Amino acid sequence: QIQSYAGETILRGDDFKKYVTGLREKSNIYKQRKAEVSDLKAEYGVLERTLEILRGREEALIENLSSAEAEKGISGFRETRDNLEQVAEEKANLDEMKGETLEDMSGLVHQLTMKISERKARLAPIIKELRPLRQDHQDLQME
């Protein structure tokens, strides 16, 4: 029998106790996690059932609301209101996008204005020199 265990170490004394203690700790952790998973599965089932109940109530309320609208002569009010809310939300999103685009364009205009001013300032002395030369050239052509 001892020869069949050749190559494997046999734990004795304190080493064996440590090994068994480690196994017990792992077993306890496994049991805790398994209980947590079981609790979560049960909670999921409860939540699924709650969702199903709420959807059923929503359908019943929508039907009641539709019949009340029909009695009052304002059929389709809820749908119209929902559509208006959706359109308003989409408009708000578009307005936000327009605002961002406008800010970008404003920044671009500012940059272009700065470049134009910079170039004007750079060209001003050259233009100043050119004016008398043009005048001289014009005078020479007239003669």
Image: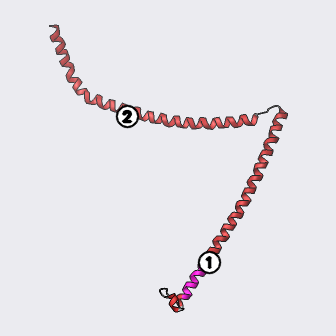
Q: Main secondary structure of the magenta part?
A: helix
**Residue 104 lies in the magenta stretch:** no
Q: Position of residue 72 (x, y in %)?
A: 83, 33
Mark 1 surroundings within 10 Å by alpha-carbon count, few (fewer than 14), some (14 through 19), many (20 or more): few
Which element carries disc 1, helix, strand or loop? Answer: helix
Residue type, label 2: Gln
Mark 2 highlights which residue?
111
Report the quarter where the N terminus lies.
Answer: bottom right
Residue 45's place in the image compared with 18, above or below, is above
Residue found 25% across the figure and 27% down from its top: 123
Which contiguous range is marked in magenta? Answer: 16-28
Residue found 16% across the figure and 10% down from its top: 141
Q: Can you tell which quarter of the image residue 37 is in?
A: bottom right
Is residue 19 in view from this perspective? yes
* Residue furthest out toward the right: 71
Mark 1 or mark 2, which has the lower sequence index?
1
Report the quarter where the C terminus lies.
Answer: top left
Q: How many marks?
A: 2
| 124 or 91, nearer to the observer | 91
Mark 1 highlights which residue?
27
Q: CA distance from mark 1 to mark 2?
A: 69 Å
Please give left or right for residue 65 compared with residue 101 in the image. Answer: right
**Residue 27 lies in the magenta stretch:** yes
Residue found 19% across the figure and 15% down from its top: 135
Residue type, label 1: Ser
| 141 or 74, nearer to the observer | 74
Q: Which mark is residue 60?
A: none
Q: Position of residue 64 (x, y in %)?
A: 82, 41
